[in-house]
Every structure is written in structure tokens, then in C-alpha cells.
Amino acid sequence: MSRVLDDAVRASLDAAVRLLQAGELVAFPTETVYGLGANAANPEAVAKIFAAKGRPADHPVIVHLPGAAHIERWAVDIPQTAWDLAEAFWPGPLTLILKRAPATPLAVTGGQETVGLRAPAHPLALALLRAYAQAGGGRQGMCGIAAPSANRFGRISPTDAAHVREELGDAVSLVLDGGACDVGIESTIIDLSNLDVPPRILRPGHITPGQIAAVIGLMPAMPGQAQPTGSPRVPGALAAHYAPRTPVRVVAAAVLAETLAALHHTGQSAALIAHSSSAASLPARSWCLLPDEAEGFARGLYAALRTADRGGCDVIVVEAVPDRPEWAAVADRICRAAAGAGGTHQ
Ligand code: TXA
Ligand code: MG
């Protein structure tokens, strides 16, 4: 990076820190998706996130930290597994749900006694968090940035700066532009807040249960499994989430051709998002062929859904992904996209 660019980045980071300290909103890139950030120690600043997103106030937001050294300011009763997971995967796409410390405002926890913490790996996010910490953070050395994904409530998470402006416009004071996000879907969330039960995955993501098991020595419970009473609510895991306006149909590869033909015959236009190369010859108004491997597919999925949504088709057809562990997080997101208005999963 040239010196001139360095100065420009430094100036925008300084501006971002000043805005955060003044209680304003700053959108920033993470390796997963763009976040809409506010001083996590200031309930009025956090309230602006909810207003900008149109999100219900009882939804908790993740607090982003510069690193594991900050966990104890925000959480108490921290199990060894939390330290081990932070050591293994931070900075990175893993959110730890822990018991809230008294100083952690209920505004970020959605009124719950748990808090979600993560140190993101994007260099600009880390630079922002470090600059914020160096400037003294928000209040009494609490240098956490509360940030949900920078989209309107229930819509597709943004994976580049232009998506954020499209979603939130003037509601955000500054958008730090760090280019396209590398991971492309939101972090894995694991609940470690109840010491009496095994860790539980609340939202699948790039870090897989197998990778987690390799660190903590046991397989975490999965979202579908029966939950102990008192488990944290995960409102972001609502069935219809991450949804475009156009209905989404998830269609198995084996019936893709006949589904598209049937749509065509009934005069319905389809935008196709697929991963099998054979899909390029199918009758659709538009095609997006994503990589035939889980990481590449995840990286491109949200931008593909956004483009398809803008195209004015009657339906977005997404080719179902393989039923294998490495595809689980992607399968979760396309299933939620299909749970929006008029979508189906077949
Ligand atoms: O990758 C990500 O996690 C992105 C980037 C910006 O870090 N953030 C993100 O935030 O996806 P959001 O707010 O869109 O989704 C956060 C999820 C929500 O489902 C929320 O309910 C859950 O995390 N969550 C946050 N704090 C929680 C808590 N204390 N207990 C249970 N769930 C929590
Ligand atoms: Mg979100």
C-alpha cells in the first residue's frame, strides 16, 4: 500500500473513531459481511443501530473486540473452552455467547443475560478496533463496537461497501470501504453461556462443528437439537431471514431443468443461481454460476442474490447444495432466503 493510501486510510480510521466516540454509526468491513457499528458501551448509540436497520429492540447485537484480552470487560464466568476457541479462531469468523458482565449494557444483549463477542479478521476492522482502543474506546476503557450486519432488518447481509450504501443510505455517517468480504456469510455462533450443558452452535458458519470439536474435545450440539431451558434467544435465526424481495426456490440439481422449463412454459421469468457447470445451458432469464465448492459459493452467494433480486424476475431459482458438512452453513442461508415471501424449498 502506498504512503498516500496509508494516510487516506489513517484519516478515515481517525474519522471513524471520532464518530463512534460521538455516538454515531460507522459501517465497516469484516471478513464475513459488513457491520453497522456503534459504541457498544453507549445505549443511545446502540439504539441508533436499531433505528437505522428497522430492527426490533429485543434483538441482541454482537460486540466486536480487538482481541481476547478484552473478553473479561464484557463477560463473566468464562469457561476454558471460550479461551481455547478464541485462541484458535480469533481474529476470525466465530462469535462466542457468554454470560454478560454487569458493565455490558442490556441494549446490546437485547435484554438478555448473555453477550455475543467476536474479534473480526478483516485488516480494516482490526485497525479500526485497535485505533478505537488506543483512543480510549467508548467508556471506562470499554472498547467494543456493537455491530449487526449492515442491512435493513430481514434482508440480505451486505458483502461490499456499495451494498451498505444501497441498504442504509444516509442513515450511516461513514462507510469504511474494505472491498468485497472474503468469507461472505455471517460468523459461526456458539453458545458457551451455560456451564452445565455442552456448547451449542446457534448459527452455522465458516468455522465448522468439526473444527470446534478439534479444539474443545467434544462435538457441539447443533441448532435443531432440543434446547435446555434458559437458552439464549437467537432472533437472527428466524426462519425467514437473509431474504431477497423476489421469491426464492431451492431446487435439487436433478429437477433443475424440468423446473426451469415449467416456469418458462407458464411465462414466469427465472434468475438462476447454480454451482453445477451444466446449469449454464438451462432456460433462465439470467444466470449466476458460483464456484462448485462451499467456500467460493459462500463468498459469492449474497452478491448473487442481490443482483438476481434487482433483475426483476418472477422467481430466483437456487440450485440445492450438496448435503455435506462443509456446505451446511450455505445450505442454512439459502434455506432462510427461501423462507421469505413466496419462497419454497424442494
Ligand atoms: O459475521 C457476523 O457475525 C456479522 C459481522 C458484522 O460480525 N454480524 C452479524 O450480526 O451477523 P447480526 O446481528 O446480523 O447477527 C448476530 C446474531 C443474531 O442472530 C443475534 O440474535 C445473535 O447473533 N446474537 C448476538 N448476541 C447474542 C446473544 N447474547 N445471545 C444470543 N444470540 C445473540
Ligand atoms: Mg444480520
Image (cartoon, rainbow, N blue to C red):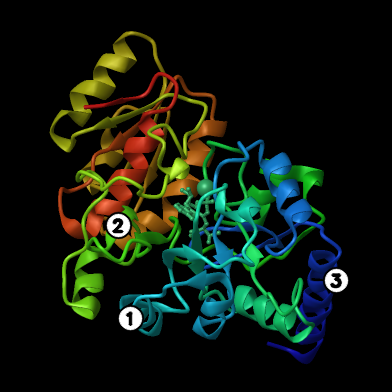
At mark 1, the secondary structure is: helix
Q: Quadrant of the N terminus?
A: bottom right
Asked if disc 1 is less than 8 Å from ligand 1, the answer is no
Which of the two residues, 262 or 346, is positioned nearer the viewer here?
Answer: 346
> Answer yes or no: do the residues labelled 2 and 3 have beta carbons within 8 Å?
no
Residue 285 shown left or right of residue 317 in the figure = right
Number of the label disc, if any, that sits on residue 80: 1
The quarter of the picture where residue 272 lies is: top left
Q: CA distance from mark 2 to mark 3?
A: 36 Å
Q: Where in the figure is residue 279, as x and y percent of width and height?
A: 26, 39
Query: Mark 2 — residue?
Result: 201
Q: Quadrant of the C terminus?
A: top left
User: Residue type at mark 3?
Assistant: Arg
> Which residue is located at x 64 percent, y 75 percent?
124
Query: Mark 3 — residue?
Result: 18
At mark 2, the secondary structure is: strand
At mark 3, the secondary structure is: helix
Residue 127 shown left or right of residue 236 in the figure = right
Please identify, in this view, whether the residue under mark 2 or under mark 1 is nearer the observer.
1
> Which residue is located at x 18 percent, y 34 percent?
252
Q: How packed is label 1: few (under 14 Cα within 10 Å), some, or many (20 or more)?
A: few
Residue furthest bottom in the image: 3
User: Residue type at mark 2?
Assistant: Ile
Please identify, in this view, whether the residue under mark 1 or under mark 3 is nearer the observer.
1
Asked if disc 3 is less than 8 Å from ligand 1, the answer is no
Q: Earlier in the sequence, mark 2 or mark 1?
A: 1
Q: Earlier in the sequence, mark 2 or mark 3?
A: 3
User: Residue type at mark 1?
Assistant: Gln
Q: CA distance from mark 2 to mark 1?
A: 17 Å
Q: CA distance from mark 1 to mark 3?
A: 35 Å
Which of the two residues, 344 or 65, is positioned nearer the viewer here?
Answer: 65
